[in-house]
Amino acid sequence: MPTTHPRGTPPGGRPATPSTTPSTAPSSTPLTIPFTTQVNRSIVAAMIVVSLITLGLFAVTGFNRLVQQTQESALRIAQTVAQTPDVRAGAEDESQRQPPSTDAELVAGTLDDYAREVEARTGALFVVITDDTGRRLAHPSPGEIGDPVSTSPDAALRGEETVSWERGTLGDSARAKVPVYGLDRPDTVVGEVSVGLPPTEVWSTVLADAVPVVLSTALALGVGGLLARFITRRLREKTLGLQPEELLALVHDQQAVLQGVDDGVVGLSADDVVTVCNDRAAALLGLDDPVGRRVEEAVGHAGVVERIKDARSGVPDPPLQPLVVDGRLVYVDVHDVRRDGRLLGRVVIVRDVTAVEDLTRRLTAVGTLAGALREQRHEFANRIHVVTGLVRAGDTTEALDYLDRIGEHGPVRFPVDNAGLVREPYLQAFLGAKALEAERQGVTLRVGPDADVSGSLLHPEDVTTVLGNLVDNGIAAAVASERAPRWVEVEALRHGDELHLSVMDSGDGAAADPFAPSPRAAEPRGAEPRGAEPEPGESAPGEAGPAHGHGIGLRLSADVARRHGGELRLAMGRTERHGAVFVARLDHQFEQEDGR
């Protein structure tokens, strides 16, 4: 039974001591009843109300039924008494007697003795016999004999049989009234017989019948209480003990967080069914209505599914291993969600780093170009000092020869064949820097015999981004190939304000067109071969896939070319003499007024 505490008394049972300084007394806050407790109490209260209503209906219907049965019993007794010849004869004689018998004579008569005998035999409260005027001829109380009856005898004297629950001189009773017909005059009503059965007869029967009902109801309440406790416990487990307002706040926060972050978020249940997915994740992974489906069905990219399976099996995720998904470079992180040591599910975070990779490549190209220009400036200053010294010494002929030799290969002697065909300073310096990188890997970088570029680039950082990616891929393909010698050839040609580039290598070629529109499953990035610096998104040459077409770099370079009104495509997959050939065109790279 719950214990109630007076106001101001804590549940511990010790009354709170009133503070002597009301201004510093802490304000009392109402205790919040947990939602599961409210549910439990509501269920129990509902069962109690239903049980009470059921008991009430049973009591009312049972009481009415027993009253009716008792009235029928009283009617049968009254009918039996009214048909007795002595009663019929005595009532008929008294109705015809003039003057009527005195009260003493009636008390001493045989009718009253017979009525008392019937009472004793049937357990009736009373058996009353009257004449045709309603005067009592027999009554349990001798003092009432000779007096008119307390309830109306008119219906019985009219020949009607009635039953009722009425209050008379002996209290409440289920009574029946039947007419008494004369013995000599069978068609004439000469009196009535009224029989009443006590209410204790009804109540004792009701209580006897109610005992099994009450016991079964109590048992049902007990079972219902246990079920309510089980339901509330399951509800507490399913809701993690959170209150409805907390669940509502969680839903609001969930939507705000999911749609407010730039990362893709996919929520999985413990059995890997997608429970939530924000718009960003659907866009990055190409998902179509994934909620409610298993992750293997919802996510069509093999690399992402494999990453989730590895997290489920406890396989540690290699650090910094991005995936190429539909031409975008993404990181997929899978984290377990636990509460109180129980696994609730997993959350998959998808981060798009394509823009970051694009910016990284641009910065790398700019850094390479800046380093080459810095070296050129330093070397150019040295050449100027030499020329100045020769001129001052009067060796004009030697100075002119020296300048001619410099003009053939530029201010810096880079290991690039035909470098003089590319006279644009940015491209010349960039190719020289790339040639030094290629030389460290045993690859020769050369300029094709048909190259011809002069003037000055308007967007050198974009051009070097595209050309740098193609050259890096060509170097990696040459290193991975068994062919010798290893080389990469660059053709650069200016046509008006357009710049045309072509990069060919001595590698094994590209097995498939990396720009083909057919979607591919995501593939993890492989390791870089033989000392080459890792380029995010590039494939591992010499492994199962070809050197070209696995990474994000080609797609990023193609985007750069398209932004300048050009294109980047695979012109040739491979031949017996060389590997893949990639060509690019970038518009509006030169000023029209520079003479070309």
Image (cartoon, grey):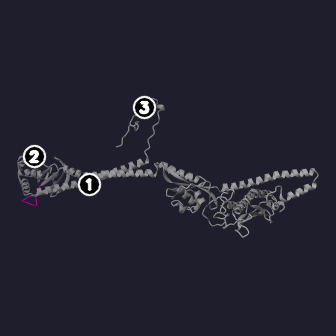
Would you say the magenta stretch is mainly helix, strand or loop? loop
* Structural crowding at the residue carrying mark 1, measured as other residues with C-alpha within 10 Å and reported as few (<14), some (14–19) or many (≥20): few
Dividing the picture into quadrants, the one containing residue 400 is: bottom right
Which residue position holds label 3? 18
What amino acid is found at the position of numbered circle 2 in the picture? Pro
User: 559 and 83: which one is in front?
Assistant: 559
Quadrant of the drawing holding the C terminus: bottom right
What amino acid is found at the position of numbered circle 1 in the picture? Thr
Q: CA distance from mark 2 to mark 3?
A: 73 Å
Q: CA distance from mark 1 to mark 3?
A: 56 Å
Front disc: 2 or 1:
1
Q: Is residue 342 magenta?
A: no
Q: Is residue 186 magenta?
A: yes
Residue reaching furthest to the top: 20
197 is higher (above) or lower (below) than 29: below
Dividing the picture into quadrants, the one containing residue 528 is: bottom right
Which residue position holds label 2? 142
Do we see residue 56 in this rendering?
Answer: no
- Residue 451 x %, y %: 80, 64
Label 1 sits on a secondary structure element that is helix
Which residue position holds label 1? 61
Q: CA distance from mark 2 to mark 1?
A: 38 Å
The magenta stretch is 182-191
Taking the image as shown, residue 65 lies to the left or right of residue 125, namely right
Label 2 sits on a secondary structure element that is helix
Taking the image as shown, residue 472 lies to the left or right of residue 192, namely right
